[in-house]
Amino acid sequence: MATDSWVNETLYADWGQRFLVKRELARVQSDFQDIMIFESTSHGRVMLLDGVTQITEADEFVYQEMLTHVPLLAHGDAKNVLIIGAGDGGVLRRVLQHQGVERAVMVEIDGEVIRLCKEFLPTIAGDAWTNPRADVIVGDGIDYVRRAPDASFDVIIVDSTDPIGVGEVLFTDEFYANCARILTERGLVVNQCGVPFMQADELRETSVRRAKFIPHVGAYVAAVPTYVGGFMTLGFAAKQAGLGQVPVETIRARAAAAGMLDQTKYWTPEIHAGAFNLPPYIAQHLPR
C-alpha cells in the first residue's frame, strides 16, 4: 500500500528519527510485539518492532558483520555457535560464511518475525534458512540456554531488542549464568548494548551482570547510521583473557582460513582491532 506518510521512531520520548514511507508492506501484531515492515525512500526496506528500528536494507551490513565476525574471529576455532534472536536471518547468514562452523543454532521467540522477513526482507538471510549446518528454532532463548548441555557452544551471539518488552529477559543474571555454563573453555558471548550516548545504563548494567559469571568483560563499537546517537556498543565477555586484543595479522589469517575475506562491506581486520579502542565516554561505563 503506497502511503507517502512519515513513521516516527519511538525509542526515545524526547528525540528520534523518522522515515518517509514509500509503501507499507506488512503490519502485524504478533503474540509478542507489533511488527511493521515498509519500503522507505532512503534506506530500502525497514523493519520496526514496537515502533523501534531494528534493521534496514541500506545499513544492516554494519551491525550484522560486527556482531558476527568479531566474536568468531576473536575465538578463532568456533565449531558450534548459538544465536539468540536475530529473526531476520542476517547473523545466521554471516555465521555460516565461516567454513569452520559445523553447527549454527538460532533461537527466535517470534515466528512472525522470521515469516515476515523471509517474505519481505529475503536478501538479508539469503539461503541461510536452508543451509544444512543451520538449526532454526522458534522458541524461547531463555529456556533454550537453561536446558542446553554444559560446554555445548563456543560462541553465543545475542541479537535482541533493548531490555524492554520481549527482550528484557535476555539481560538477567539467570541468562548470563547459563550462558557461562554452556560455553566451552575458551567460549565467549556478545550482545548489543545500545548507543551509550543515549543508553549508558544499558552498557553499564549489562556489563556488571556479565562480569558476575564470565571473567573478561569489555565492549567494542560499530557506527550504524540507523542506530542514531553515535557509536553502537556490542558487549564482549570471554572466559579466556586476551580475546579482545588479538593482533591484526592473526585476525587476517583467521579470516582467510575461514573463507570470508573480501565478503564484507564494513568489517576488516583493522576495523576489528580498532573497535575495541573505546572513547573515554564509553569506556567509563565498563567494570574496572
Image: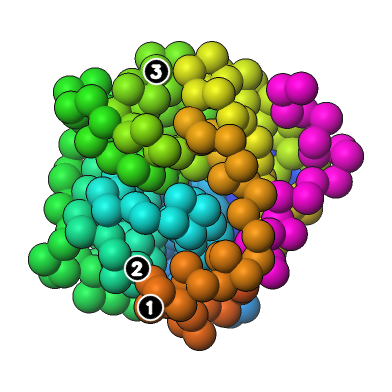
Residue 186 placement: quadrant: top left
Query: Does the magenta run of residues contain 285?
Result: yes
C-beta proximity under 8 Å, tags 1 and 2: yes
Closest to the observer, 257 or 60: 257
Q: Which mark is residue 11?
A: none
Q: Which residue is mark 3?
A: 177
The C terminus lies in which quarter of the figure? top right
Closest to the observer, 249 or 193: 249
Expressed as whole percent of the image width and height from the top left, the position of residue 241 reads: 58, 35
Upstream in sequence: badge 1 or badge 2: 2
Q: Which mark is residue 98?
A: 2
Query: Does the magenta run of residues contain 192?
Result: no
Q: Which residue is mark 1?
A: 259
Q: Residues within 10 Å of mark 2 (few under 14, many from 20)?
A: many
Expressed as whole percent of the image width and height from the top left, the position of residue 54 reads: 50, 53
Image: 80 above or below 183: below
Disc 3 on helix, strand or loop?
helix
Q: Residues within 10 Å of mark 1 (few under 14, many from 20)?
A: some
Q: Residues within 10 Å of mark 3 (few under 14, many from 20)?
A: some
Can residue 220 be seen by looking at this rendering? yes
